[in-house]
Image (cartoon, rainbow, N blue to C red):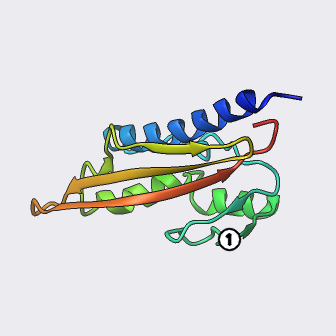
Amino acid sequence: MRTSEERIAPNLKIAKYYFRSFVEGAKSNVVRSPTYYKCWARGVTMINSNSPRGVPKARVMSDEERKRFAAANSGTDFSTLEMQAFWTKMPGFAAIPGTFRAYPTEDDVFWFEYFGGHTKEGRWVDLWEADYARINDRG
């Protein structure tokens, strides 16, 4: 059995990884989040108010649903699709370095990301996003 500190450290690392992928995504036009690498646990629950077609909201996603989602989007993960939608109007829109805030526990992590960028017309647009991940003892 891992200690509390041994469980909290990886949870913080997961949140930092997500944040970094949204900072760097605008440079490569790909967000390399855990979903990019197909790091979905069996029975994952996805909650996202901006979920693209094919991603269920606030319920357990079956293995079959995950496969259908990946096939419907040519294997592109939903984080990249979401950001590509922003980039059509705001090239360079990304998470802003230095704004990451996370609150990990033994079983989960909450984190906040601040996004911003200029529209093609030069207007600044920004928003805060709150994220949550429940993580089992195996990470």
Instruction: Provide the residue designation for mark 1.
Output: 58
Which corner quadrant holds the C terminus?
Answer: top right
User: Quick check: 39 left or right of 27?
Assistant: right
Q: Residue at x 60, y 55 (%)?
A: 132
Q: Is residue 78 visible?
A: no
- Look at the picture and state if 45 lies above or below 38: below
Along the viewing direction, whichever of 107 and 59 lies nearer the viewer: 107
Give x and y (percent) for residue 83. 40, 56
Looking at the rendered structure, the secondary structure element under dot 1 is loop
Along the viewing direction, whichever of 80 and 45 lies nearer the viewer: 45
Give x and y (percent) for residue 129. 43, 59
Q: Residues within 10 Å of mark 1 (few under 14, many from 20)?
A: few
Along the viewing direction, whichever of 9 and 81 lies nearer the viewer: 9
What is the quadrant of residue 3 in the picture? top right
Work out which residue is located at the far front of the displayed protein and give it. Answer: 4
- Look at the picture and state if 112 lies above or below 119: above
Along the viewing direction, whichever of 33 and 1 lies nearer the viewer: 1
Q: Residue at x 68, y 35 (%)?
A: 8
Q: How many marks?
A: 1
User: Quick check: 5 left or right of 115?
Assistant: right
Give the amino acid at mark 1. Answer: Ala
Give x and y (percent) for residue 126. 27, 60
Which corner quadrant holds the N terminus?
Answer: top right
Work out which residue is located at the far right of the displayed protein and give it. Answer: 1
Q: Residue at x 64, y 72 (%)?
A: 57
Q: Residue at x 73, y 27 (%)?
A: 6
- Look at the picture and state if 50 lies above or below 135: below
Give x and y (percent) for residue 7. 74, 33
